[in-house]
Image (cartoon, helix red, strand yellow):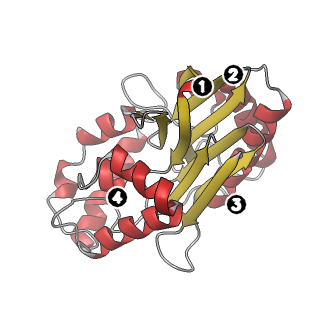
Amino acid sequence: MNVALASLPAEPGQANEDFAAAAAGAAVLLDGAGVAGADTGCTHGIAWFSSTLGGLLLSTITAHPTRPLAECLADSIRVVRSLHEDGCDLTYRGSPTSTVVAVRVDAGALEYLVLGDSTLLLADQDGKTTAITDQRLDEAGKRLRGPVDELLTGSPQHAAALARYRDALTGLRNRPGGFWIAGPDAQAAEHALTGVVPLKKLASITLLSDGATRLVDSFGIATWEGTLSVLNSFGPNELIHHVRKAEAGDPHGRRWPRGKAKDDATVLHWMMF
């Protein structure tokens, strides 16, 4: 394995709610979330949830190489729930949740799982890229976020509209017609996107939180092929630098309306040769 990993919080000194890690033949990336400006009902917090679930998931998928990734995720969610359900209110609507991307190599194939709006970017030997993202969260959000995008990012009005939007979005979480994400309910794992890809076709595997994919899927100023070129030539830190530069050029969301001016950004880039 040749793995490069970079992760930065949205602001220096701020808790990073992303988590990524790799082991022999496996890797995971999680992007934790709550309801903006609201109590989570959890005494541990969002960063604890994503890192605890991520560490358990990586351990589980490596310790049980024949178990499907979705089953491993479900088991890991149950364990995390058992760790804090006695002291935390897991029925609270703002309880911590997380996206999940997990990959595992075995018997000449790559097995993958994607839940939520983080991205798995696969690159073939000929440079062709395939981005696998769970679009259900974005699709649900598009139905609700019009009033948010009309306001300047960071303004009091924007913050109020964003809180209303996220409260409404939470009402669609982990239910048919809405979206699915890792939280207190292990059933969400059953709704993850999963698949298998022949390993011989792959040149690289990249796991990205949505804070690191903004140049492509939010700002529209880069392609996946361009993203791959930066990663191969300069590494994950350089990609995040490009994201931060673009964010700094539009601090109030005039060009690119968005919920956060800056977001935690994490990239795990795994070269296959």
Horizontal relation, residue 227 to residue 157: left or right: right
Mark 4, secondary structure of its residue: helix
What residue did someone put label 3 on? 44
User: Mark 2 and mark 1 in contact (Cβ < 8 Å)?
Assistant: yes
> Where 192 sits versus 160, above or below?
above
What residue did someone put label 2 on? 108
> Where 258 sits versus 165, above or below?
below
Seen at 22% across and 66% down, the residue is 253
What residue did someone put label 1 on? 200
The image position of residue 258, as x and y in percent, is: 28, 59
Mark 3, secondary structure of its residue: loop
The span from disc 1 to disc 4 (Cα, nearest Å) is: 46 Å
The span from disc 3 to disc 2 (Cα, nearest Å) is: 39 Å
For badge 2, the amino acid type reads: Gly
The residue mark sitting in front, 1 or 3, is: 1
The span from disc 3 to disc 4 (Cα, nearest Å) is: 22 Å
Classify the position of the N terminus by image quarter.
top right
Binning the other alpha carbons within 10 Å of mark 2 as few (below 14), some (14 to 19) or many (20 upward) gives: few
For badge 1, the amino acid type reads: Lys
Mark 2, secondary structure of its residue: loop
